[in-house]
Image (cartoon, rainbow, N blue to C red):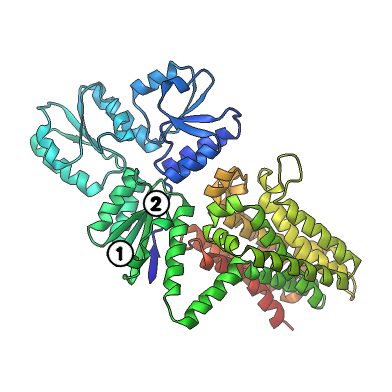
Amino acid sequence: MKLIVARKAGFCMGVRKALEMVLERAREEKGGIITYGPLIHNPQVVELLSSKRITSSRNMEKFKRGTVCFISAHGISPEERERLETTDAKICDASCPDVLRVQGQIRKYAGNGYSTIIFGDRGHTEVKGLLGFAKGRGYVISSREETDRLPRLDRVCLVSQTTQNQDDYDRLAAVLKERFPGLEVLQTICPSTLARQEEVSEMSGQVDAMVVVGGKNSANTARLTRLAGNRVPVFQVETADEMEMERLSRFQTVGVTAGASTPNWLIQGVVDRLRDWSWNRKNACLRWFYLLLTVIVKAHFFIALGGACLTCASMRLLGIPLQWPAIFLSFSLLLAIYNLNVFAEQPAILLNQPSRHHFFRGNRKILYALIAVSLATAFFCAFLLGKGALLLTVFTLLFGLAYSFTILPGRRLKNLTGLKEFFSSLGWGVLAVLVPAASTRTGTPPVISVIVVFIFVFSIMFVRSSLFAIRDIQGDRLVGRETIPVVLGVEKTKIMLLILTGLTALLLVLATLQGWVPPFGFCYLGVIAYGCFYLLFYYKRIIFQGLNHEMLVDGQLLLSGLIAFLIR
């Protein structure tokens, strides 16, 4: 089975904004938050919000003085806002900017004596809110057949629910113009909806079936389902557990898209389930290959191998011989720390990496044994390298565990604002650079060389960690992780990573010209160029989550080791 995943699947701007607002306020409020109706139309997200004391209600009696009340992304009518204001609750407006724009247009035309026809789902929260701005001269229709029920109107404007289908809206406008020649047709379908509909239309011509992920109560998800269903069989699911795998297995190519209120982890869960099912139906050799690849990546053998390769590169750049105990130390300690941290971070792993969560849950005993063996190997290697390496190993291990386990009352390193990526990269620098430098028997490398190589390693790992933090930003926000993308925002983080990559390249060139690292230091510009390559792919959303994403990003580390072994 071939999978095609929509690039524009998942949260739209309005949903993302609403979630960011309510989660940021939730960190400040001790008494909890009430949203006026569900914040977004996705039951899984609403359930997670309730676990963080963010509940929903339309009962005015619950909105007492001092209560923090959030208006949902769908907006509300002026009458509802007035009733909320009489409760003396602290009102925060998380309405989608596109919805607010439509409300403003209706208010403007209604003020000039226009009647408003709203094309939308009667009873939907957004449509109810829009209707309230029409000053009693609003009419809701959901199909061309309903146009006959409209009364005679003199001055009329036509708007649409922001998530309606553009083709349906255009056809309806053509019919209404015949009846109301002076009809003002306003373009009110949001750009995100248009882009998703265009992508689904294009995808449905390339696949044999479509899977649409989203809440059963989500209007935009339902429309994507209908749009795709015009051309191919379509399956709408809320989670991977709802998929009919036997029926889906009949199709050669399957597309996956999602509604605007569907979080990434639900989309990834569906993609992982489809990919696993596809590989399990192949011949025995391919099944075993995929199983091996899955274990290598999910149990962190691949990133541990990358750590060993980066350690080799560091020793070459420091001008010291390769020390196999140091290489095995990096591999073993990273393998132990990464796996231990997964067990310590299960709530976040479940949201950000659902397939890894299920892998660890199903292989708990084996992975605990792997951790024990890895730690024993790491300390044996450190013992061989000497006291300096042993002390640094203990420091790195404690530092790595402190990253996930409580070190202060109610606080962990990973939860300290914006420090997750910094501390992770710092630990890599200690392991890949300081341990070999402290344990070499051929003379201590110059301090300037150690500093340059440390910055090189720190930069590579900081970019890697930040990229994964961008990928996991939705889950991190929900569990309260204050990563750099959460604090700075995705766009500023991207700019920062590009600047850091450029500065690292300049430092490597300068260090090579000055003789701080050997002449072949220029070769490692290829490692930085590789990083620029996957940064470009990442920014264009060509890379999705999953095994291929991790292997592509961590391939940079393997490249550094390959260069180290090729240089003589």
Secondary structure of the residue carrying numbered label 2: loop
Q: Nearer the viewer, mark 2 or mark 1?
A: 2
**482 over 551 or under it: above or below:** above
Query: What mark, if any, has residue 381 been given in the picture?
Result: none
Task: Measuring from the top left, give residue 294's x and y in whole percent.
Answer: 55, 70
Badge 1: how crowded within 10 Å, few (<14), some, or many (20+)?
A: many
Q: Kindly give the residue lying farthest to the front in the view shown.
A: 365
Relative to 450, is 363 on the left or the right?
left
Q: Amino acid at mark 2?
A: Glu
Q: Quote the CA–CA distance across marks 2 and 1.
A: 17 Å
Badge 2: how crowded within 10 Å, few (<14), some, or many (20+)?
A: many
Task: Measuring from the top left, give residue 17's x and y in whole percent.
Answer: 47, 40
The residue depicted at 59 percent of the width and 50 percent of the height is 347
Relative to 241, is 181 on the left or the right?
left
Task: Measuring from the top left, give residue 118's x and y in whole percent.
Answer: 23, 34
User: Which quadrant, please, contains the C terminus?
Assistant: bottom right
The residue depicted at 12 percent of the width and 27 percent of the height is 153
Residue 180 in view here: no
Query: What mark, if any, has residue 238 been given in the picture?
Result: 2
User: Which quadrant, please, contains the N terminus?
Assistant: bottom left
Which quadrant of the view contains residue 561?
bottom right
The residue depicted at 44 percent of the width and 56 percent of the height is 267
The residue depicted at 68 percent of the width and 61 percent of the height is 338
Closest to the observer, 455 or 150: 150
Residue 276 in view here: yes
Relative to 274, is 306 on the left or the right?
right
Relative to 431, is 555 on the left or the right?
left
Query: What mark, if any, has residue 209 been given in the picture?
Result: 1
Q: Earlier in the sequence, mark 2 or mark 1?
A: 1
**430 over 383 or under it: above or below:** above
Q: Amino acid at mark 1?
A: Ala
**546 over 186 or under it: above or below:** below
